[in-house]
Image (cartoon, rainbow, N blue to C red):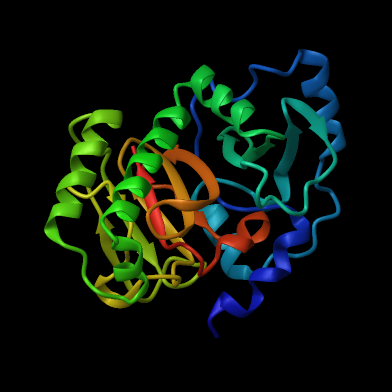
């Protein structure tokens, strides 16, 4: 049976699979005392049993799901579990310890967009550049009447993709980071296709193979990636910013369950 029907099961546990993060992006704001407090506060000793498929995915990535801890931060300060991440500029990453197969998931939210952008500046995540890219694309789409065309499900003119490529090069460089493979369920099996690549590192539309609002997880196919996911076309309505090492899997389960079957546009770098 498809696991789409159980995605809500893990929301209270605060777990998702996201392998890797930038070495310098985890603990700029927190003091040693705050980190110790957070580890104690968010130890997940009372996790409900995970579905076997979820447990297996963690194990394949070298993680014992029973040894996962989750830390939540709001504006750099440790807080209780944040059940609803939407509209809080969420940023998520995971650090694993291969020696004992444990892992710490860090979930950060921000009270203002500027604080979110500053965090990106401090950690080389290019959040500010992403915002500028989004605004340039959205303005171009509005001026040229492309929003209506897209909402009607019609193909956009080649001039749009030329403009999008030019803007990507302006803000992120000449080429994208690598390949990304998507799946139509929260476990990576079944229907899938390489839909993003160094040639198309931005994707405002999932026209081919009808992927719009159907993605349940994806696998990274490069050394390192940062992804920004959006609920609307033309990179509108930010859902979450993620990062991780190549070969890792991101599942829209647990705390990321709200993203399942909602992605309409996405940016890689």
User: Which of these two is toward me, 142 or 25?
Assistant: 142
Residue at 32%, 68% (x, y): give it. 150
Q: In this view, does 216 lie above or below 225?
A: below
Give left or right: position of 66 versus 7: right
Residue at 72%, 61% (x, y): give it. 11
The image quadrant where one finds the N terminus is bottom right
Q: Is residue 184 above or below residue 65?
A: below
One can see residue 198 in this view: no
Q: Position of residue 149 (x, y in %)?
A: 29, 70
Q: Which residue is the extreme one toward the front?
A: 143
Give left or right: position of 156 versus 81: left
Splitting the image into 4 quarters, where does residue 182 fall?
bottom left
Q: Position of residue 207 (x, y in %)?
A: 27, 70
**Image label count:** 0
Residue at 43%, 44% (x, y): give it. 227
Residue at 22%, 50% (x, y): give it. 200
Q: Where is residue 75 in the image (x, y as percent from the top left)?
A: 72, 28
One can see residue 193 in this view: yes
Give left or right: position of 14 versus 34: left
The image quadrant where one finds the C terminus is top left
Q: Is residue 172 above or below residue 70?
A: above
User: Which of these two is toward me, 225 or 98?
Assistant: 225
Q: Where is residue 22 in the image (x, y as percent from the top left)?
A: 49, 27
């Amino acid at each position: 049976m498809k696991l789409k029907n159980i995605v809500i099961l893990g929301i209270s546990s605060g777990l998702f699979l996201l392998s890797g993060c930038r070495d310098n992006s985890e603990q700029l704001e927190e003091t040693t005392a705050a980190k110790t407090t957070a580890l104690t506060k968010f130890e997940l000793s009372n996790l409900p049993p995970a579905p076997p498929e979820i447990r297996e995915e963690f194990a394949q990535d070298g993680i014992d799901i029973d040894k996962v801890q989750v830390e939540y931060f709001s504006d750099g300060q440790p807080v209780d579990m944040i059940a609803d991440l939407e509209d809080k500029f969420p940023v998520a990453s995971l650090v694993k310890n291969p020696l004992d197969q444990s892992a710490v998931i860090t979930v950060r939210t921000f009270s203002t967009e500027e604080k979110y952008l500053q965090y990106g500046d401090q950690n080389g995540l290019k959040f500010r550049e992403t915002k500028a890219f989004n605004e340039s694309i959205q303005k171009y789409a509005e001026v040229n009447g492309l929003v209506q065309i897209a909402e009607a499900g019609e193909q956009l003119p080649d001039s749009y993709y030329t403009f999008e490529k030019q803007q990507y090069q302006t803000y992120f460089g000449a080429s994208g980071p690598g390949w990304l493979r998507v799946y139509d369920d929260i476990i990576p099996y079944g229907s899938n296709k390489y839909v993003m690549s160094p040639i198309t590192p931005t994707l405002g539309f999932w026209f081919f193979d009808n992927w719009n609002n159907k993605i349940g997880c994806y696998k990274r196919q490069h050394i390192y990636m940062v992804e920004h996911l959006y609920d609307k076309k033309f990179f509108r309505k930010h859902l979450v910013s993620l990062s991780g090492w190549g070969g890792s899997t991101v599942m829209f389960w647990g705390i990321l369950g709200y993203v399942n079957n909602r992605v309409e546009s996405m940016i890689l770098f």
